[in-house]
Image: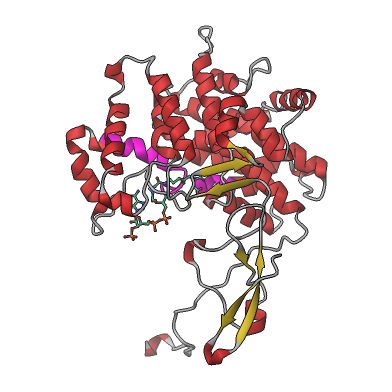
Amino acid sequence: MSDDVYRLIGPGGNEMKLPIRTGTVGPNLVDIGALYKTKGVFTYDPGFVSTGSCESDITYIDGEQGILMYRGYPVEQLAANSSFIEVSYLLLHGNLPTSKELEKFERTIRRHTMLNEGMLNFFKGFRYDAHPMAMLSAVVGSMSAYYHSEMDASNPDHRDIFAHRILAKLPTIAAAAYKLNTGQPFIYPRNDLNYCENLLHMLFAVPAEPYEIDEVAAEALDLLFILHADHEQNCSTSTVRMAGSSGANPYSAIAAGIAALWGPAHGGANEAVLKMLEQIGDVSQIKKYVDKAKDKSDPFRLMGFGHRVYKNFDPRATIIRDMCHKILQRLDRKDTPLFDLAQELEQVALKDDYFIEKNLYPNVDFYSGIIYKALGIPTSMFTVMFALGRSVGWAAHWREMIADPTTKIARPRQLYTGPAQRDYAPIEKR
Ligand code: SDX
């Protein structure tokens, strides 16, 4: 708590002193917790643009400086030196692991990748063309039907096994959804492979022939998962916290987060970027679509541009763009028209006054889809890939929320603008 206060002067000059809360770094927060009880008024902030929902030690973002830190470590350093499994340990436990801790953690994750065999029956019931995000949220929600004996949120061991199961089993569920879409048989996980090698194996191996892991593809996926792992109180993470705040089991809370991530304004943007690039089709059409994005009467937006917090470059987009170059250099240039189009679109938008004035820069979703496509992952699986990376962030935030003694059930208020009280009229009098 800071010594300073904000003085709120209401109608009639009545004043209220609002305490200020100061964090390690970043803007101060005005504590309005006593406002309604003291002054009988609510604050109004649709979309929570200026509202902090909690205290958190996990991730810090500075939108003006383009800074992203996991437990204090800049994401650029983690991207250059770490692995997704090591970053997962960091997000869940708060510090980088020793080699012994990392070896034990990785072995635990490798040994939790199989699903209860009964869960595979769900995939026999889905339509062959079901969207993988629909299948992911459904099957993750069903985990609470299999692991109900270990869902006591007050038990630290249950909180650990939940995090291990989410991290380890989501790739298996994601790959099963993809195999349903392709009509190919489900491929079981292998404990001798690392996290991303195993995912590639479950996605692309077939029983008819040996599958050779593409190590550059595994490296690219590991980097993408590090960059997607957490992002403070974004829409899907806030959804996980809100669902968990009622005491709902953690698997259902994660399923709620997956549903929120699916929206095109959030994690669904990477899928929407590829669809947009395919819609634009050619560099000659870029100006037409940039003009559409600027036209208030046109609902079209440049997907992959803009961010609620970053009013500068999204640091993740910069790292992903460089990885894009590396992946696409292996491909014949004739196969990379979408990347060339994306680069031209980025240059046009960044020079446009509208985008400059509104601080609209490429975000994490602008280039990630191009890498996924280059790796042979279909557009429908892009948001699933986002969910695989973000799953550990969701788990870390659920654990932090559930362990916080100040956590209350999340229950916002509203500004009522409906009809004043009126009496019921019999149907013959309506
Ligand atoms: C993610 O929160 C997170 O941390 C999310 C995320 C994470 O890691 O969890 O970073 C992942 O979700 C990234 C964002 C992916 N979404 C998209 O790329 C979809 C396209 N972007 C927009 O829909 C939008 O930029 C948002 C949703 C990302 C942010 O919207 P805000 O903060 O609510 O801003 P806004 O909609 O109020 O826009 C401000 C202005 C508006 O114009 P005015 O009303 O002021 O005249 O900028 C305009 C908007 O019309 N604008 C755009 C635009 N984004 C905003 N105009 C054209 N194209 C765009 N992409």
Q: Nearer the viewer, residue 210 or 316?
A: 316
Q: Is residue 269 magenta?
A: yes
Q: Is residue 164 above or below residue 328?
A: below
Q: Work out whether residue 64 can be spotted.
A: yes
Q: Residue 172, position in %: x, y?
A: 60, 28
Whether residue 157 sits left or right of residue 430 in the image: it is: right
Looking at the magenta stretch, what is its main secondary structure?
helix
Q: What residue is shown at x 38% (from left), y 29% (from top)? A: 370
Q: Is residue 307 above or below residue 221?
A: below
Q: Nearer the viewer, residue 63 or 401?
A: 63
User: How does the figure colour the protein chain or chains?
Assistant: secondary structure
Q: Is residue 214 magenta?
A: no
Q: What residue is shown at x 29% (from left), y 17% (from top)? A: 333
Q: Work out whether residue 131 can be spotted.
A: no
The residue range painted magenta reads 255-278
Q: Residue furthest bottom?
A: 12
Q: Is residue 196 above or below residue 123?
A: above
Whether residue 150 sits left or right of residue 3 in the image: it is: right
Picture quarter with the N terminus? bottom right
Q: Residue 217, position in %: x, y?
A: 49, 19
Residue 187 placement: quadrant = top right
Q: What residue is shown at x 53% (from left), y 13% (from top)? A: 213
Q: Nearer the viewer, residue 91 or 19?
A: 19
Whether residue 395 sits left or right of residue 124 in the image: it is: right
Q: Residue furthest top?
A: 209
Numbered disc total = 0
